[in-house]
């Protein structure tokens, strides 16, 4: 009997978990996130192309040269290094990675700022919707007269 109760409790727990997950997945947040990941990946390709085609050659010029990878065709910043005790430290590729990161971070900052501004404008429009104005004294008086006339007409109709 106790084993059956434990099995039922476990089944209810699992069912509740699946129900929660289904609600989460169907809310739309997951879909929004998936679209964001896909757009982010595509955008990362654009930024990588920009850094490989324009920024890396500039960094290569500034640090002493760059090489083209024969397999991928990408420009690899090979200059900008120093040696200590036979160990070579390269900083050109590191600078390229930093520039790539800064470009992506800046563009994402601008996108988030634009989305937040659009959301706040939408909220302001909702707040600015005209509320029903308070009735004036004349309107209150006219409403009272109308109600009295309705009551008077109803009373006369009852008498007939």
Image (cartoon, grey):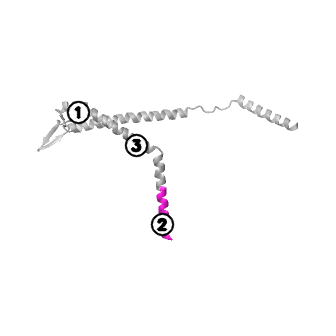
Q: Residue at x 30, y 38 (%)?
A: 101
Task: Measuring from the top left, give residue 20's x and y in whole percent.
Answer: 48, 52
Residue in the image at 22% along x and 38% along y: 72
Separation of residues labelled 2 and 3 (CA atoms): 38 Å
Mark 1 and mark 2 lie on one chain; the one further toward the N terminus is 2
Residue designated by label 2: 6
The answer to which of marks 2 and 3 sits earlier in the sequence is 2
Q: Residues within 10 Å of mark 1 (few under 14, many from 20)?
A: many
Q: Which residue is mark 3?
A: 34
Identify the residue at image location x=31%, y=36%: 45
Camera-near label (1 vs 2) is 2
* Residue 54 vertical placement versus 158 (above, below): above
Q: CA distance from mark 1 to mark 3?
A: 31 Å
- Res 57 quadrant in image: top left
Tell me residue 88's x, y (percent).
15, 42
The residue that disc 1 covers is 56
């Amino acid at each position: 009997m106790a084993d059956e109760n434990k099995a039922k409790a476990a089944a209810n727990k699992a069912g509740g978990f699946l129900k929660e997950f289904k609600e989460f997945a169907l809310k739309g947040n997951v879909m929004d996130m998936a679209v964001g990941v896909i757009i982010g990946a595509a955008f990362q390709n654009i930024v990588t192309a920009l850094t490989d085609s324009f920024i890396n050659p500039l960094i290569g010029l500034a640090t002493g040269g760059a090489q083209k990878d024969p397999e991928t065709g990408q420009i690899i910043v090979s200059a900008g290094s120093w040696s200590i005790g036979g160990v070579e430290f390269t900083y050109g590729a590191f600078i390229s990675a930093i520039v790539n990161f800064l470009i992506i971070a800046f563009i994402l900052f601008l996108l988030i700022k634009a989305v937040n501004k659009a959301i706040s404008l939408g909220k302001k429009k909702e707040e600015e919707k005209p509320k029903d104005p308070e009735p004036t004294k004349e309107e209150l008086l006219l409403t009272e007269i109308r109600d009295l006339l309705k009551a008077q007409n109803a009373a006369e109709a009852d008498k007939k």
